[in-house]
Amino acid sequence: MITLKDLAATLGVSVSTVSKALKDSPEISKDTIARVKEIAKELNYRPNTLALSLKNRKTKTIGVIIPDILNVFFARILYGIEQESNVLGYNIITCLSNESFKKENNSLNLLANGSVDGFIMSVAQETQTNGEVKHLKDTINQDVPIVMFDRVANDVDCDKVIIDDFNAAFRGTEILIKEGRKKIILVNTLGDLSVGKLRILGYKKALEKHESYKGEPIVIDIEDDKAILNDQLENIIREHKDMDGLFCIDNVSGVMSVNIAQRIGKKVPEELSVIGFASDDISHLSYPHLSTITQHAEAIGQQSVRMLVARLESKEEAIPTSTATVDFTIELRGSTLEK
Amino acid sequence: MITLKDLAATLGVSVSTVSKALKDSPEISKDTIARVKEIAKELNYRPNTLALSLKNRKTKTIGVIIPDILNVFFARILYGIEQESNVLGYNIITCLSNESFKKENNSLNLLANGSVDGFIMSVAQETQTNGEVKHLKDTINQDVPIVMFDRVANDVDCDKVIIDDFNAAFRGTEILIKEGRKKIILVNTLGDLSVGKLRILGYKKALEKHESYKGEPIVIDIEDDKAILNDQLENIIREHKDMDGLFCIDNVSGVMSVNIAQRIGKKVPEELSVIGFASDDISHLSYPHLSTITQHAEAIGQQSVRMLVARLESKEEAIPTSTATVDFTIELRGSTLEK
DNA sequence: TTGAAAGCGCTAACAC
DNA sequence: GTGTTAGCGCTTTCAA
């Protein structure tokens, strides 16, 4: 590793001269600047980021905490975060909380000591279930800002980026209602995650609002375990013979449900209309393709970075926190009547 | 942010005393140690990693370069990398090359200046296509070790972690042959990626070896573009009416093919036996479920970390580089005859 | 048992 | 136009 000192030595000048020359300081003669730059290139000098960070008290890196990288929704968000960070000149340190409070807490503590300038994170399931917020507040109080996305702790005052889950589910449900479906069931694989609750609320609200719909809301909680998801869904479809509308609020179960229904002879969309949430491209893995409420995951990531960097680089003392809502779109494919 | 200096000031002792006390140095009296630790906890002191890194000339962080995070195979590897890094006390800085040589090169340059102790990476498609290796060799020559996984540059001397792709494809093909299939086609979505080539080789070798198989190898290259993958596969299945064995060498096309075949009335596995490569859990999104050659992506990530850390922490000057092969397993589900 | 000083690589105020 | 110095937070020799 080659340092300013090395350059200075080979050129027979002082370290500070080299430092200034590399920054095109007007204090330094054209000639010296040229010589310095030449030798710097020759020796492939690269400034030591660590030393710079120590000096500047900022690292130009963002800590990112992802609850579940195997979930494509989060992978896409990470993708968006990385892209935008790059554009704005930041690096990211990625931590995977794996839905565990302990890991999340750990990462926060480990990095909130000058290693990163701020965090972008989605709260772990465990954290959300237990309502833990102290670690989040502590971090913010240590002047390390946090931007939360998707899964958000309501009682923590920080910038947030969310989907309008309530409205998304409301609109999704409306589609089924307007098709004249009589028994619309919602399948919940999201446990008691905040976003799940909002979606369920939106579903209920839509049923309630439309007087044409006579039935009661039916929410069926099932486990999000790949091994048994298929069977659980098949059971539901078989048991509720009169179900003609199915609303799946995660990535996978919609696709699976369409395939199962078709296989056991329940025609989609004629006898059963299915709509799902999506953040990835698996909607074409069912036939007919799944109609979805599509979340723009990359956009969530990008927006998060923009908000964090805005805060980091703002001159003002304390800009008030804000919550950004990223648009969703409804993409009708073959699993619902109207395309 | 609270520093040693702060602790020293509030206690009225010197910085070095505090430093030593926190490390339970025998030089320091029990009493002082206790006092120091108490106040440190009280003020929530956290050592500044940056300063430590600068001092120690090692950062305990690993640079990870992933070509495509939206590919679940890579996401899983990242997962494995993060897990094992954690166990071994390392952080990771994640860069996404997005299959671009330029981004890959950039990340390498940006971080190979003391920001990370070493790299774990899979080579970008562009890099591999163009046969670029200089940036990789340069990095290694600057004493920043690299471990490559999956997509590997053969003419770079470094630690590597790979799947035995040749053998995996060989074995996969054999399954189809042993079922007595007469026309086995391989569909390649991997362009000229090294792993793709190896798989094709394995497929050919298997056909060649088994005299019972009379046909010629048929390799069909198609584009890995989600928008048209479906149509491309449907065309192939429709055109090759006598195809009774299909070998898909990526994650998705196997699942898709099974669904398409079933839909257009070609019975799987009776009339068409399908086998695919998998690294994720979408094999249950087809019916019948897809039989796969399963790559243990997490294991690849973990192994990579172990090799890198072993090198980083080895006392010896230069341990020779090595290549680890991670096992694959064959998981027979419904898309092939024998379960 | 404790502290002073040097140094990791870099910058910037200040001197020459 | 160039060099000296101090300091970012920490460790570690060496001196007290």
Image (cartoon, coloured by chain):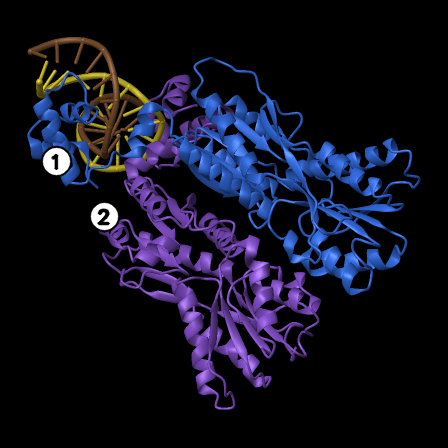
Chain colours: A purple, B blue, C yellow, D brown
Image check: A142 left or right of A261?
A: left
The local secondary structure at tag 2 comes to: loop
The chain containing the residue under callout 1 comes to B
- Please state the horizontal and vertical placement of residue B86, each as a whole percent of the image: 41, 36
In the foreground, B188 or B290: B290
Kindly indicate whether the residue at mark 1 contacts the one at mark 2 (C-beta within 8 angstroms).
Answer: no
Q: Amino acid at mark 2?
A: Gln
In the foreground, A117 or A179: A179
Which label number is shown at residue A142?
2
Which label number is shown at residue A316?
none
| Within-10-Å neighbours for mark 1: few <14, some 14–19, many 20+ | some
The local secondary structure at tag 1 comes to: helix
The chain containing the residue under callout 2 comes to A
Image check: B190 left or right of A32?
A: right
- Residue A17 appears in which quarter of the rendering? top left
Q: CA distance from mark 2 to mark 1?
A: 17 Å
Which label number is shown at residue B39?
1
Q: Residue at x 51, y 14 (%)?
A: B318
